[in-house]
Image (cartoon, grey):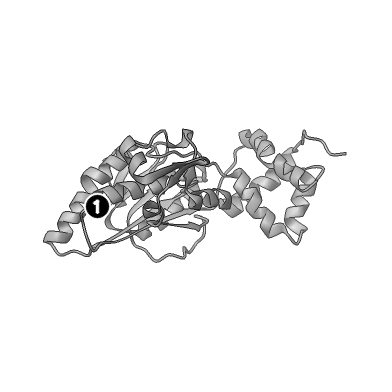
Amino acid sequence: MLTNNFELSNAEFEQFRKIIYRNTGIYLSSKKKTLLISRLSKRLRALNLADFSQYYRYLQESPNSSDELVHMINRITTNKTEFFREKYHFDFLKENVFPLMIKNAEKLRMPRRLRIWSAGCSTGEEPYSIAMIVSEAFRCVREWDIKILATDVDTDVLKKAIKGVYSHNSIVGVPGKYLRRYFVRRDDGYHLKESIKSMVVFRKLNLIREIYPMRGPFDIIFCRNVIIYFSRETKKALMQRLYQYLKDDGFIFMGHSESLMDMKDRFMYIKNTIYKKV
């Protein structure tokens, strides 16, 4: 008979901690044991398994282990997000970055190309917020090649992001004029208009991969509240990759609890977790 109260020994916790770190770069401290039990218990019930020992063997030996690994990662990852979170980041784009890009393109004949990457995009609020700001800034500007890439390791949140439908609570942070201009209210929630959805391409991407499938470079990278969950070694490796994918003089936006690690000499501090590649 299966129980709803699963127990996890210290030895088993260490086994799962290694699997999670190896596949996601997320480091779980010993204080996260209860969290792990809570997050993964649903998978044990779904698979009709009696305990974590059976679940570990399933991940190692089952023909469906690769699919289950995806489910496990989806349960472990944290996906807190909201529209226009850290509003000053978007204000900086609207008031400083985009006007300068448009001015330089017109006066200096620079390429009319804009590439933005939202790394760790969750359910899409961040990249769609960026898309709305881009739409506003380039509303009267023609012949610009603009693409926004949004990536996440969690396939469940990517499905929600691609759908582009949000509850009333989710759109609280959206300015009224944007809500009227870019959303359509229906019985099942607020639907983003195709003009915004079409600006964003969503892809699954594990940030700890040594080689990323996209070419870059990006003018702007949002990587906010992502590396906070990684070990120091993984953070350093990721920051080096982000630096390589960022265009010279490009901007990177970080979370409040995150640092540039040992790469402060490669980025210029602008303001409030906004940095410029030098």
Residue ID at (24%, 52%): 139
Could you say where residue 226 lies in the image, as x and y percent from the top left?
Answer: 47, 45
Check the image and name the residue furthest to the right. Answer: 1
Could you say where residue 174 lies in the image, as x and y percent from the top left?
Answer: 37, 37
Label 1: how many Cα within 10 Å (few below 14, some 14–19, many 20+): few
The answer, for residue 221, to whether it is visible in the render is yes
What SS does tag 1 mark? Answer: loop
- In depth, the one of 252 and 236 nearer the eye is 252
Residue ID at (41%, 51%): 118
The answer, for residue 223, to whether it is visible in the render is no
- In depth, the one of 118 and 260 nearer the eye is 118
Residue 158 left/right relative to 134:
right
Check the image and name the residue furthest to the front. Answer: 187
Check the image and name the residue furthest to the left. Answer: 107
Residue ID at (42%, 44%): 184
Could you say where residue 130 lies in the image, as x and y percent from the top left?
Answer: 35, 48
Image quadrant occupied by the N terminus? top right
- In the picture of the structure, the residue carrying the numbered disc 1 is 139
Could you say where residue 80 lies in the image, as x and y percent from the top left?
Answer: 50, 38
Q: How many marks?
A: 1
Amino acid type of the residue tagged 1 in the rendering: Arg
Q: Quadrant of residue 12?
A: top right
Image quadrant occupied by the C terminus? bottom left
Q: Is residue 215 above or below residue 47?
A: below
Residue 178 left/right relative to 139:
right
Q: Quadrant of residue 37?
A: top right
